[in-house]
Amino acid sequence: MSFAVSPASRTVLVTGATSGIGWETARLLAERGDTVIVHAPDQASGDDAVARMVAAGTDTLRLRLVVADFSRLDEVRAMAARVMEEHPVLDVLVNNAAVAAPEQRTMTADGNELSLQVNFLAAYLLTHELAGPLSARPGSRVVNVSSSMHRTASIAWNDPHRAKRYSRLAAYAQSQLALTVFAREQAPWTSVSVHPGVCDTGLLPLYAHEGDSALQGAECVVRLCDPAAELVPGAYYDRRALSPAAPVAMEDRTVRRLCKLADQLVAARTA
């Protein structure tokens, strides 16, 4: 699949861009002519990801590397501050970073269940921290890379970290439901969520034994980043098709309740 080169260079931030769908998304967007901010959880994996893109033919001048471990919210804030300082205009944010929930419930230093924080809370915080750059130019977009698994999920409002009953599948699905609901928050930019298909990435064991290529999944994401593609604000896309999200994700009350919970969970911890 080919994409038209952007008529004017835009600036795009892709989280979780060191492998899989994130890496392919960043590469395709740079190929289009966008300036791509490549997010990595650490310097070594970031340097390797950029080197592989350049080896694949990507213009190194199109790439910028930022580093933040999303299991630490202070690093998310620091990364956002750097992006704002160096890129006062941000046209697209792709919230792609994700981890599989561990077999045993794992808590971050911020006091959150690991997959909830990395897959949703970090994206929530980053998006809000980058409100200035995202609002700087009309037509900006936020694309949340979610999952069809959100349909199997429920948000444990009174126990979001699942201390009472933990299941890695339930925890992961909850994070994907939260990310899907978050796309419906009212904002100056257009937000959507997308299930890029079951792809052969590190998350494949949660879904199946075989899947599409990461490139095929990335093409679904990049299509939503294209300014020529008309988007329905708050919508959920299944690969390339507009699709109904889980009924609970369409409730305005759920959006308000989730954002209130997220605000509490990302609040800076005091000593």
Image: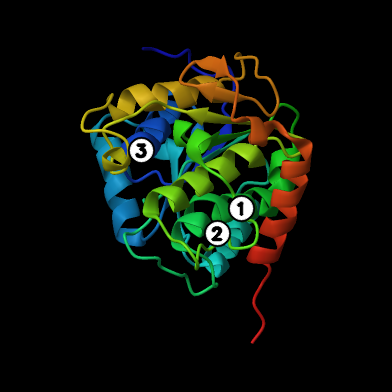
Q: Are marks 2 and 1 in contact (CB under 8 Å)?
A: yes
Residue at horizontal 47 percent and vertical 44 percent from the top: 173
Residue 105 falls in image quadrant: bottom left
Image coordinates of residue 39 in percent, x first then y, are 45, 49
Of labels 2 and 1, the one closer to you: 1
Name the kind of residue labelled 2 in the image.
Met
Image coordinates of residue 220 in percent, x first then y, are 45, 22
Judge the density around disc 2: few (<14), some (14-19), many (≥20) Cα neighbours within 10 Å: many
Image coordinates of residue 62 in percent, x first then y, are 44, 36
> What label does residue 126 carry, if any?
1
Residue 92 falls in image quadrant: top right
Extreme residue in the front direction: 165
**Residue 196 seen:** yes
- Compared to residue 53, the image places residue 138 above or below, namely above
- Compared to residue 103, the image places residue 242 above or below, namely above
Image coordinates of residue 165 in percent, x first then y, are 46, 62
Secondary element at tag 1:
helix
N-term-proximal mark, 1 vs 3: 3
The residue under label 3 is: 23
Q: Quadrant of the N terminus?
A: top left
**Residue 145 seen:** no
Residue at horizontal 44 percent and vertical 14 percent from the top: 3
The residue under label 2 is: 79
Secondary element at tag 3:
helix
* Left or right of residue 56: residue 268: right
Judge the density around disc 1: few (<14), some (14-19), many (≥20) Cα neighbours within 10 Å: many
Measured Cα–Cα span from mark 2 to mark 1: 8 Å
